Image (cartoon, rainbow, N blue to C red):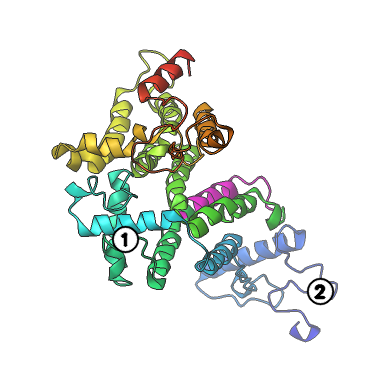
Amino acid sequence: MEASGFPPWTLGGPAGDMAFNRKGSSPAAIEARLRLMRKLQAAELSGVPVPLEDGDFRPDQQPVVRKTRTTSPFGVLLVTVTCFKFMLFGCYHSTDFEVHRNWLAITSSLPFRKWYYEATSEWTLDYPPLFAWMEWCLSLFARFFDRAMLDLDNLNYASPRTVFFQRLSVVALDAVYIYAVREGYRILTQRSISAKIRTLYTPSFIFAGLMLWNVGLLMVDHIHFQYNGFLLGLVQLAVMRILERRYFAAAFWFSLAVNMKHIFLYMAPAFGIFLLRQCCWPELSLRGFNLRNFLVLGGIFGAITTVSLGPFAVLGQLPQVMSRLFPFQRGLTHAYWAPNVWALYNGVDKILTIVGPKLGLTDRNASVGALTGGLVGGQEHSVLPSISPGTADSFWGSTGR
């Protein structure tokens, strides 16, 4: 048999019609299995081994098909985008770079009870305490790169080692974002309808490519300088857990995101109502209300918020912390980012401070409008009447929004 070119595990025959196919559904293969089973049964009853013939089906001699390791598409995307991030280390950075350097100095140089009172720099700490504790953790590593960056008086300090460390910290914290994208990639892969679609056209690959190569995040985080990828990763993890119907885990990740950056509060009503509907009130009836799940959801959010704000509440500093987190005296817009009527109002005030003196409409000594500077300190309109928080709240209430 072997001389004829057929391996010993085939079922023989020059025409190859007795060969065992992969599915094992041919009549010849079935017959060979039955013949082998009869011989094995006879050998077991007699106690005498029965030699197998060359044409018999031999499962122990089947060819071993080794799975070829293929490169993960997600891994390729991850490696390429990470290399690209390192290439951006030498790019320009904005004032936010100095903001976070100053926060490193505040959290490492002062006890936490002084964090929200420190005002040596104009870039005072105005993120929630949980984010401040993260800055403190980063400062533990920063000292190994350049201790001078942790000096409160070193304003606008940006040595090469400082730039390298802060850029590296953004890349490192992006691990949270990458994990969130990987979870989405996994979920979409599991829900894929067909495995015959080419990799480049699968929903999971498209999703991973768009998320990992998010141009906006690359520009804002790795050039301008921010930690938005890390923060958005927390929110995305909450969304992924919702897709998996793991609602308590979703509550955990979203609570963590809100306590890291309070801007996510605007999403809280949507998340809160959805989680309450799914966990506590699926039937929309009084009898169907699940009090246990309600307490669990409240406990998750309460525990994380207590860890974040608890120490400051014990010291009686909550009003000071809140004044930093919600500085209404800053104005109603922040560096032209708020797309509302107050952005237009402040923009007109800014224009009048420049054009007004030339047209003789305002005094040349009028102060230049600074409502769009983004600082925590109180600001007033230069030409137009200043809008107080109470006036803005009344206007908001009267419009029903």
Q: Is residue 137 above or below residue 304?
A: below
**SS at mark 2 in the image:** loop
Q: Position of residue 304 (x, y in %)?
A: 28, 40
Is 251 part of what is drawn in magenta? no
Question: In the picture, residue 318 is in which quadrant?
Answer: top left
Q: Nearer the viewer, residue 13 or 76?
A: 76
Type of the residue with mark 1: Leu
Q: Residue furthest left?
A: 315
Res 295 visible: yes
Question: Which residue corresponds to the image point at 29% horizontal and 69% vertical from the top-left?
Answer: 148
Dividing the picture into quadrants, the one containing residue 78 is bottom right
Which residue, given by chain and number where applicable, does mark 2 sit on? 13
Q: What label sits on residue 138 in the rendered view?
A: 1
In the image, 349 versus 6, the foreground residue is 349
Residue at the (22%, 45%) spot, across then down? 117
Residue at the far right in the pictured view: 15
Q: In which quarter of the image is the N terminus?
A: bottom right
Q: Position of residue 231 (x, y in %)?
A: 42, 48
Which amino acid type is shown beneath numbered disc 2?
Gly
Whichever of labels 1 and 2 marks the residue nearer the N terminus, that label is 2
Mark 1 vs mark 2: in front: 1
Q: Nearer the viewer, residue 50 or 291?
A: 291
User: Can residue 283 be seen in this snapshot?
Assistant: no
Horizontal and vertical percent position of residue 244: 48, 40
Which residues, given as a range, are shown in magenta? 179-195
The outermost residue toward the bottom is 3
